[in-house]
Amino acid sequence: DEYKIKIDTSNGCNEELRVTLAWYDPPGAVGCLKCLVNDIDLMIEEIGGGSEVFYPNGLSQQDTSNTVERIRMQASDAQEFRVIVHSRNFAFNRQQYSLAITGCLAEADELKPDLTEAMKSSPNCSREELFTFKINTAETAHQLRWHFIGSTVNNGIETIASGPGPEFGYEYEANETYYHSYCLTKDSKYRFQLKNSAGGGLGSGKYSLSYGAVTIFDSDSSEDFEDVKNHRFQVLASGVKILGKNR
């Protein structure tokens, strides 16, 4: 996957560019202390100029040992970069990952990757099969938590993902835009829940849920995250059916 970003310091921003990739790796062989089952690589490539390539964790090449990879660097106004997430070796054909990009970025609407937005569940997932949760935080959301749950073939339920995870320090920063995306299974039901986990001090912001080109929910203005928000929907063979919401 590739994500194109552009630096904008016209508003006085002087933050460094930070890109963090994280994923939960399947269990390795018994006795193996440092083995990646599904190995994913993170790189940043400058577009134009010298086309310099940057690697994570202070290395001069791909990291083949860790499930959290971070690149921190200084960038100049109007510089453009290509963030590359590459699957080096997969023992399984399904792997979720999370990607956080912060810094002096151009407007959020301009941050549009070539295929997915920030998290992708399967190498064979198309844009039309992608569920995306996008959140714009107006304040630091210390207690903001979300859970994404799906039905199983035996009429049970399973947690697909929860957040924010360790790659975000378990909280979202103020005035940032975050994307989480997952490939979904057709003819299955899903529930997305956004809530305050401890009461008070949660903050506010805007968020949206979509499946392919279909908008499941989009808050028009800043939301108060003090209340629990539930969204239920079903993925059909051709589209999505909204089953209900509780806001």
Image (cartoon, rainbow, N blue to C red):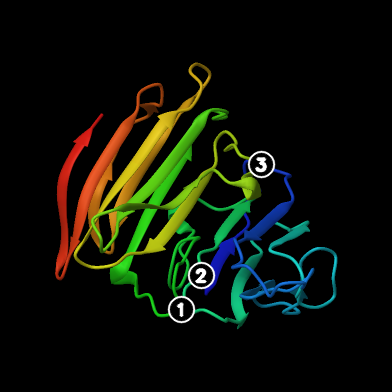
In the image, is residue 146 above or below residue 212?
A: above
Give the quarter of the image for residue 83: bottom right
Q: As rendered, which of 179 and 166 lies closer to the eye?
A: 166
- Using residue 5 as the reference point, say whether residue 156 is left or right of it: left
Q: Nearer the viewer, mark 2 or mark 1?
A: 2
**Residue type at the position of mark 1:** Pro
**Taking the image as drawn, is residue 220 in sight?**
no
Real-space CA distance between mark 3 and mark 1, rounded to the nearest whole angstrom: 27 Å
What residue is shown with label 2? 95
Mark 3 sits on what residue? Answer: 169
Q: Are marks 2 and 1 in contact (CB under 8 Å)?
A: yes
Which residue occupies 64% across, 61% down? 21
Q: Amino acid at mark 2?
A: Gln
The mark that comes first in sequence, 3 or 1, is 1
Q: Is residue 102 above or below residue 49?
A: above
Please state which amino acid type lies under the numbered disc 3. Answer: Gly
